[in-house]
């Protein structure tokens, strides 16, 4: 297995489970199950024992390996700098070993099957190609968010087109689940279509799509300028006209792992919110690099390995948002939107806290007369 040589380096200090201020736990699988086997350190020892044939590959071990949500907290807080950047690569390599051997939990198998299918004007030499991505295509809530972002881009005179029904999965979740062959297939098809259309600049709905197209596609021949929609809308909103008749609103922002820890993008979403009069932005105790993952990455939004009946990271996160005094929890990722809204309902906090996507907040406060002519 690739990166197997680093597995013995872990000396189990436990910092991989924590944020930088050591408050609570920041590893979603560990938060949910509270067994050391679900922590990054425990997972490394189990993978090593399996590779050395000291333990059998059981259904539980498969679940532990695939429970990693690829949030990157372990990379951010590992105390061993010589190999910390390889932690997630090692976990993905272990998933790849299982996928290649046909040993995956049924939920993972079904999710990978769905990723080969997708449905969503057409791109015709506009400035940007808007890439909708998996959740924007598969999930009803994701489709609402996609429409909201499209509306906000249009209202702010951004020139863009879609692939429409020709769009397939961006492949990030397949990549995170270790299905490298499927990822190469999906990425290859997308790159072929994008290059044939002459696409140069891409706006993504999802931070997951942003990450994979920006960082993985270039290795396969897909070289584009890639933006998360917040990076495009943040400067555009400085020219926008907003309603003055709405009451103040206290908002807190949830940092997506694939924007934040993976790509060091923390400012654009906050600039979007800061451009809207009447919004007060408050920070949760864990934010920026220390933000707690929603638990939806690595395919977990689709597979449900981390059961909502457990004390999940998402449930902890909405409690933290309520503790901040916010009325609205703002998100820039459709996966986070689904996970956190569900968690708010499970926690019976959905009357105290509304989970809304960034463009939905902006659209609700744009002046009705503000149109594409104001660009």
Image (cartoon, grey):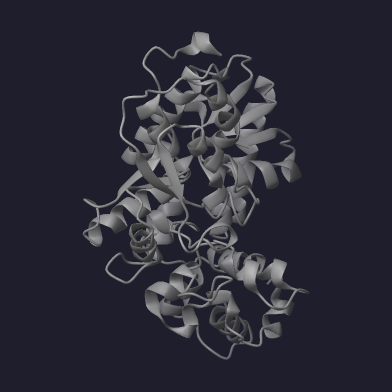
Location of residue 79 by image quarter: bottom right
Location of residue 81 by image quarter: bottom right
Residue at screen point 33% across, 40% down:
141
Which residue occupies the extreme top position in the image? 373
Q: Nearer the viewer, residue 287 or 177?
A: 287
Coordinates of residue 159 in the picture (x, y in percent) = 57, 17
Coordinates of residue 140 in the picture (x, y in percent) = 32, 38
Which residue occupies the extreme bottom position in the image? 54
Residue at screen point 75% across, 38% down:
221
Residue at screen point 65% across, 50% down:
263
Q: Look at the image and tell me in which quarter the N terminus lies.
A: bottom right
Coordinates of residue 329 in the picture (x, y in percent) = 38, 49
Q: Look at the image and tell me in which quarter the C terminus lies.
A: top right
Q: Is residue 29 visible?
A: yes
Coordinates of residue 248 in the picture (x, y in percent) = 34, 38
Above or below 310: residue 165: above
Q: Is residue 248 left or right of residue 331?
A: left
Above or below 244: residue 264: below
Q: Nearer the viewer, residue 266 or 300?
A: 266
Residue at screen point 59% across, 79% down:
15
Above or below 363: residue 24: below
Q: Is residue 82 left or right of residue 261?
A: right
Q: Is residue 63 visible?
A: no
- So how many labels did they put on this image? 0
Which residue occupies the extreme right position in the image? 82
């Amino acid at each position: 297995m690739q990166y197997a040589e680093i597995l013995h380096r872990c000396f189990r200090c436990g910092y991989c489970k924590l944020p930088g201020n050591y408050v609570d736990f920041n590893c979603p699988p560990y938060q949910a199950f509270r067994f050391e086997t679900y922590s990054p350190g425990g997972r490394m020892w189990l993978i090593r024992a399996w590779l050395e044939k000291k333990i059998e590959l059981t259904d539980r071990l498969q679940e532990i390996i695939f429970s990693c949500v690829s949030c990157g907290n372990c990379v951010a807080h590992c105390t061993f700098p010589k190999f910390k950047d390889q932690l997630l690569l090692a976990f993905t390599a272990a998933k790849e070993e299982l996928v290649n051997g046909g040993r995956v939990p049924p939920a993972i198998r079904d999710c990978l099957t769905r990723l080969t299918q997708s449905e969503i004007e057409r791109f015709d030499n506009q400035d940007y190609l808007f890439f909708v991505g998996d959740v924007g295509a598969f999930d009803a809530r994701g489709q609402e968010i996609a429409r909201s972002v499209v509306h906000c881009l249009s209202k702010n005179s951004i020139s863009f087109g879609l692939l429409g029904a020709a769009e397939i999965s961006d492949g990030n979740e397949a990549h995170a689940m270790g299905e490298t062959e499927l990822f190469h297939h999906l990425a290859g098809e997308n790159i072929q279509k994008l290059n044939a259309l002459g696409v140069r600049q891409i706006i993504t709905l999802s931070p997951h799509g942003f990450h994979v197209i920006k960082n993985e596609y270039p290795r396969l021949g897909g070289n584009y300028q890639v933006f998360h929609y917040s990076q495009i809308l943040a400067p555009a909103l400085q020219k926008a006209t907003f309603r003055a008749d709405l009451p103040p609103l206290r908002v807190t922002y949830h940092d997506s792992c694939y924007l934040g820890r993976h790509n060091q993008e923390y400012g654009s979403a906050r600039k979007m919110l800061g451009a809207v009069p009447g919004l007060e932005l408050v920070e949760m105790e864990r934010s920026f690099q220390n933000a707690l993952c929603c638990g939806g990455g690595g395919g977990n939004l689709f597979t449900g390995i981390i059961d909502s009946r457990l004390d999940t990271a998402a449930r902890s996160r909405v409690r933290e948002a309520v503790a901040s005094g916010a009325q609205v929890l703002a998100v820039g990722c459709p996966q986070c939107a689904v996970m956190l809204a569900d968690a708010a309902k499970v926690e019976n906090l959905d009357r105290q806290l509304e989970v809304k996507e960034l463009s939905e907040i902006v659209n609700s406060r744009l002046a009705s007369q503000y149109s594409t002519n104001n660009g």
